[in-house]
Amino acid sequence: MNQLVTILAADGFSFMRGHDMRTLLGPMADWDAFARSWSDLGLDTYMADGGRYRKRRFGAFGASGGEPIHRKPDQPHYQSRDYNPLNGGIARWFDPILPDVATGASMTAILATCRTLFEQLAPTRDWHIEVHQFRIETRSGEAGRPTPEGMHRDGVDYVLVLLVGRRNVQSGVTSIRGTDGRDLGSFTLTEPCDAAWVDDHRVMHGVTPVEPIDPAEPGFRDVLVVTFRREDDAA
């Protein structure tokens, strides 16, 4: 944790391999069931590019002072068009994250680790937290676009992108750029729990499209995206 804090403070991002991430997160007894829940996501119907390659569930959480992280009532996800010129500017309602997923050991460990880390980087203990389950699908002749808006910031303070699984896909390279456009690094999330940590104020991130390795079979890329924003700045 201390090394990760140092890297994020210095560089604004960090890539972490799955075995290191699992050590950081600690026990996640329900991981298999957690990962299987990605097979029960609803279609994202807000894609302005007309794509039907993205499925998702969404949930909002909060953390205040020393109190445990709690789930907030179901609410829409909103980004201004300044941050998401493709799909932003409207309140988007998605299927909610299922209760057993939201309160399970894996989600609890992930959110608690994020909170511990981010509270060492920012002088606050009050957070608005958003959690997204994404499945990006691809098949022959149809690439899946994990970030159809391109290189972007999310309009939050910190972001975790955690790979849950991928099947029959190639590419999906996560790239980081400075706000001045400089390329700072790239990394492909290939194994469960491979992760990218991002200081959203300091860098932009994006992911290249995925395509099937075997064109005769469909493929998918499953990720969990967690964002933390200071509660005073939350809508």
Image: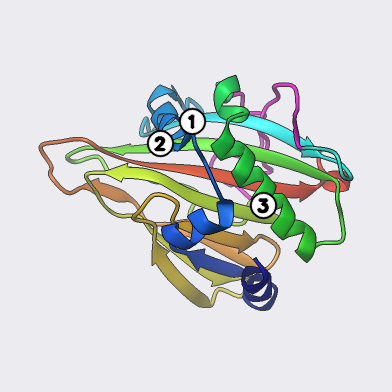
Please indicate, yes or no, whether residue 155 appears anywhere in the rendered image.
no
Q: CA distance from mark 2 to mark 1?
A: 6 Å
- Identify the residue under disc 2: 135
Please state the horizontal and vertical placement of residue 60, each as a whole percent of the image. Answer: 69, 32
Callout 2 crowding tier (Cα within 10 Å): few <14, some 14–19, many ≥20: many
Please indicate, yes or no, whether residue 51 appears anywhere in the rendered image.
yes
Q: Which element type, helix, strand or loop, lies under badge 1? A: strand
Q: Which image quarter: residue 111?
A: top right
Q: CA distance from mark 2 to mark 3?
A: 22 Å
Callout 1 crowding tier (Cα within 10 Å): few <14, some 14–19, many ≥20: many
Q: Earlier in the sequence, mark 1 or mark 3?
A: 1
Q: Earlier in the sequence, mark 2 or mark 1?
A: 1
Q: Residue at x 52, y 41 (%)?
A: 28
Q: Earlier in the sequence, mark 2 or mark 3?
A: 3
- Identify the residue under disc 3: 114
Quarter of the image where the C terminus is located: top right
Q: Is 2 located above or below residue 55 in the figure? A: below
Q: Is residue 94 left or right of residue 5?
A: left
Q: Which image quarter: residue 168?
A: top left
Q: Residue at x 49, y 50 (%)?
A: 162
Instruction: Give the number of callouts.
Output: 3
Q: CA distance from mark 1 to mark 3?
A: 21 Å
- Tell me the amino acid under the disc marked 3: Cys
| Labels 2, 3: front one | 3
- Identify the residue under disc 1: 56
Q: Please provide the residue range marked out in magenta.
A: 69-94
Please state the horizontal and vertical placement of residue 50, each as a whole percent of the image. Answer: 40, 32
Callout 3 crowding tier (Cα within 10 Å): few <14, some 14–19, many ≥20: some
Q: Are marks 2 and 3 in contact (CB under 8 Å)?
A: no
Viewer-nearest residue: 180 or 128: 128
Q: Which element type, helix, strand or loop, lies under badge 3? A: helix
- Tell me the amino acid under the disc marked 2: Arg
